[in-house]
Amino acid sequence: MGFLLIVLTLLMQWEIYVAGVIFLFAVSSFIVAAFLILLGISRPQEGYLLFILAGLTLVIRGVIIPVIMNKALNRLYEKPWRVREDKPMLGVGGSILLSLILIIVGYFIYQNSLYEVLKIRSGSVPFALFLQASLLIISRRHAYIQMMGFLVMENAVVMLSGWVFSGLPFIVEAGAILDLLGLVVVSSLIIRVRENAISQEGDIYESELRG
Amino acid sequence: MNAHIVYLLPLICSFSGAVLSAIPVLYLERIVSVLASHLAFFAVIYLLFQPEYISDYFYIDGLSKLLMLAIAMVYISTVLYSLAYLKHIKNPLFQSRLYYFLLNVFASTMFFSVSMDNVGLIWVGVEATTVSSALLVATENDQVTVEAAWRYVIIVSTGLVISLIATTFIYGSSGTLSFHALMLNHPDNRVFLIGILLGLIGFGTKAGIFPMHTWLPDVHGKAPAPVSAIFSGVLLPVALYAMARLVQIYPVAVIRTFALILGILTVIVAALMMTVQNNYKRMFAYSSMENMGMILVGFSLGGYGLLGAVIIILSHGLAKSAVFFLTGDVLAAYHTTEMDGVTGLMRRMPRTASALFLAAMAVTGAPPFATFAGELFIFSALIAKYGWVLALVVMLFLSIAFIAVNFRTGKMIFTGHEEMSKHAGRIETWVPVINLLLSLLPLLFIPYFEQLLHKFLVP
């Protein structure tokens, strides 16, 4: 599953259409939810909390957040399926190559710092995901894709807390999901205003937000 | 009724204010916000004289109470200043009802963050401050402010993911996220150590600590004056509070040194950046960053360094909010944030100019303001622990910051001899004047703060 998530994030680096990235994020959230269900089955001592968390992940990260993002995209553009990243900082080839390098870096950082203590061989997966998501934020200019990068990062933390450690207290997980939902709603509004302003006036902010 | 509910009153008052502000009745949101902020303030004053409260979810000790006091004072002044300031915004992004709703929610999330006994719930609170305040940054609804709001959301949220990872590490290694449990007993292994270090980096992003500070000048430079004021005055210290708690639960040399280095680098970078600014709001934003660096140095040193840090939080909170309110007056009169475009402030707006001159002195640690006393405490702790050389380096950069801010502010106030029509004094200018006067008060209460922070001061 961790391998699948990494492949999905690699696909996100490849994808230039915003709607495609949102779809890939929804798929990756479904995988995280499935992972939590499997974890719940394998750790019956943790009771039903992992199943509730899986349900919340499925509904909020897998359905509600992608729906909100898609709706925001539909309101802003006449042909939302054709909205794409026009000015990536890195080309597709470059970002995939860098992603692969980051997976290796994540693996080495984990093996040389935490593996000795945690003894979980595949524990480097969430770290690799986190680094890839950071690259997605840094390498793209489109706000929706940056937001998706942030959400992938959050998915990496869910993987980390469930897989490597045995989850966070339920109240903290629930609070984090609520925060995430609020953040997506607020971000969608800000992005809409931002994209509207850019489409009308062009990028005029650079000189005022420098130094 | 549970007697402990009094500890939640500031949170309840501000949150109720938010809920009632959402009701669509003319002027209701303003009346409710004024009432909510005042009630929250009186509740905090009452709390100051109550014993510590530690339960499964809450940890309210002297440090939390003083942070609540700072939040309550800046909350009141922000609401009062907003009453007049919002009228000057030509094309607001939303109705004033939503502005006050978000402002009250923002205050309640800050009260929540400094009351929790759980690292994870503090994270939830600090992240909630981002959610509630992001739209406030974009109130003025132009492309630059919206861009600043977006940078704020994406940079701060990404930084806070690092502290969520830290929370996972701390919980994974210790089995608890409770402060009081961790202070009594915590593991001494690499996972826990990495967790605390990552927590410092993550919360440091929100506090504007170098090298994660890049959102801070953008937001402070472009947000409306009352929003910049509450950000600088109390939002940054709330994030620093989380860092202080992390240092407190694992006060080993590595953690303290790491926090100290981050603090000193923040002071150095902020001081250097201040010298090249031509935008007065960005310059004061870097001044906030410099003060946050000093506060972090104080927290990392502990003992009387921590007392100094708390004095700076209270005094700087009031003085810096005064500065940003006054920059709102200046912007309304001159329609520019470029320093070159502002001359003859003393002739044109004497009350604003005099207050700005003194407030700039206060935020740069000039005597007799309480920030000076706070810095003295921090320096005495720094010299005692690390000797004179490091202290002199920090003093040098504080001096650079002092000269940069006061020289440039003085230039705006005293230069320009052309005839200018005098602006009629604005009623809202009294809010920063009062804040400025209040920023002197912490000096009188140092013995009381010492008593409140007693457990931090005894070795």
Image (spheres, rainbow, N blue to C red):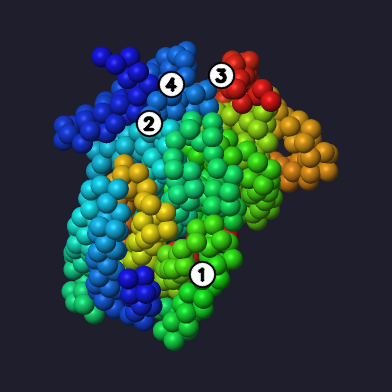
Quadrant holding the N terminus of chain B: top left
- Mark 4–mark 2 Cα distance, whole angstroms, equals 10 Å
Percent x, y for residue B296?
Answer: 61, 40
Q: Residues within 10 Å of mark 2 (few under 14, many from 20)?
A: few
Percent x, y for residue B399?
Answer: 74, 42
- Mark 3–mark 2 Cα distance, whole angstroms, equals 21 Å
Given the image, on which type of amino acid does mark 1 rest?
Gly
- Mark 1–mark 4 Cα distance, whole angstroms, equals 42 Å
Given the image, on which type of amino acid does mark 4 rest?
Tyr
Considering depth in this image, is A2 or B281 the residue closer to the camera? A2
Residue at 38% of width from left, 52% of height from top? A166
Q: How crowded is mark 4: few (under 14 residues within 10 Å), some or many (20 or more)?
A: some
Percent x, y for residue B293?
Answer: 63, 43
Q: Badge 2 sits on which subunit?
A: B
Which one is closest to the eye, mark 3 or mark 2? 2
- Mark 3–mark 4 Cα distance, whole angstroms, equals 13 Å
Question: Looking at the picture, does residue A28 appear above or below residue B197?
Answer: below
Q: Residues within 10 Å of mark 3 (few under 14, many from 20)?
A: many
Quadrant holding the C terminus of chain B: top right
Considering depth in this image, is B399 or A143 the residue closer to the camera? A143
Residue at 59% of width from left, 29% of height from top? B310
- Mark 1–mark 2 Cα distance, whole angstroms, equals 35 Å
Quadrant of res B314:
top right
Which one is closest to the eye, mark 3 or mark 4? 4
- Mark 1–mark 3 Cα distance, whole angstroms, equals 45 Å
Residue beneath label 4, please? Answer: B53
Given the image, on which type of amino acid does mark 2 rest?
Tyr
Q: Which mark identifies residue A66? A: none
Given the image, on which type of amino acid does mark 3 rest?
Leu
Residue beneath label 2, please? Answer: B57
